Amino acid sequence: MLKSVNLRNYMLKNPVRVNAEDNILEAMQVIFDNKISGLCVVDDKDNLVGILSELDCLRAALSAIYNDSNIGKVKDYMAKDNLAVAHPNEDIVDVAQDMLLKNKRRRPVVEDGKLIGQITCRQLLRAVREFKG
């Protein structure tokens, strides 16, 4: 049976991030280069201000094509309201259950407002494998 453990032990430290002022095309390149499905969005002081997913990027690209306009900035398309975040000392099982309940693949880890990590389904699966192995 999986034991409850501290999230800090499994989170990705220094997750890939973009700035809210970055161009969506730049953010898309970061997603491609890192082979990930989304990014944490921070301000100039590394405070978490949003999440940008592949779907957000697709929405931005289609909007630019449809409206014959520039593609815009990350802040125009990122999710920024009611962001679910985790604290590094939270119980990994509780976080995993909440991610399943909310159907989210990633959760930023924030301490004192600053982005310090991220937990994803992949890290959760690694934790299960280590406890089962």
Image: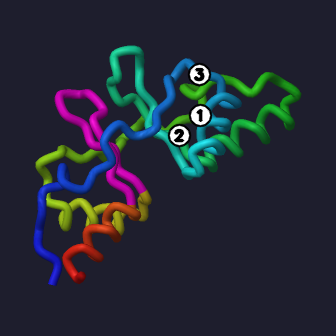
Q: Which numbered circle lies on residue 52?
A: 2
Q: Nearer the viewer, residue 116 or 50?
A: 116
Residue at image x 38%, y 57%?
A: 120
Crowding at mark 1 (Cα within 10 Å: few <14, some 14-19, many 20+): many
Q: CA distance from mark 3 to mark 1?
A: 11 Å
Residue 101 in the figure: left or right of residue 62: left
Q: Residues within 10 Å of mark 3 (few under 14, many from 20)?
A: some
Dot 2, how many residues are within 10 Å of its Cα: few (below 14), some (14-19), or many (20+)?
many
Which mark is first along the chain, 2 or 1?
Answer: 2
Which residue corresponds to mark 3? 22
**Which residue is label 1 attached to?**
77
Q: Which amino acid type is shown beneath numbered disc 1?
A: Tyr
User: Label 2 amino acid?
Assistant: Leu
Residue 131: x and y, percent? 19, 76
> Does the CB distance between marks 1 and 2 fall below 8 Å?
yes
Percent position (x, y) of residue 103? 42, 64
In which quadrant of the rendered image does the C terminus lie?
A: bottom left
In this orientation, which residue lies closer to the viewer: 68 or 46? 46
Residue 36 drawn above or below residue 77? below
For the residue pair 81 and 8, the one nearer the viewer reads as 8
Q: Could you tell which of marks 2 and 3 lies nearer the N-terminus?
A: 3
Q: Magenta region: which residues?
A: 106-120
Left or right, 45 with reference to 32: left
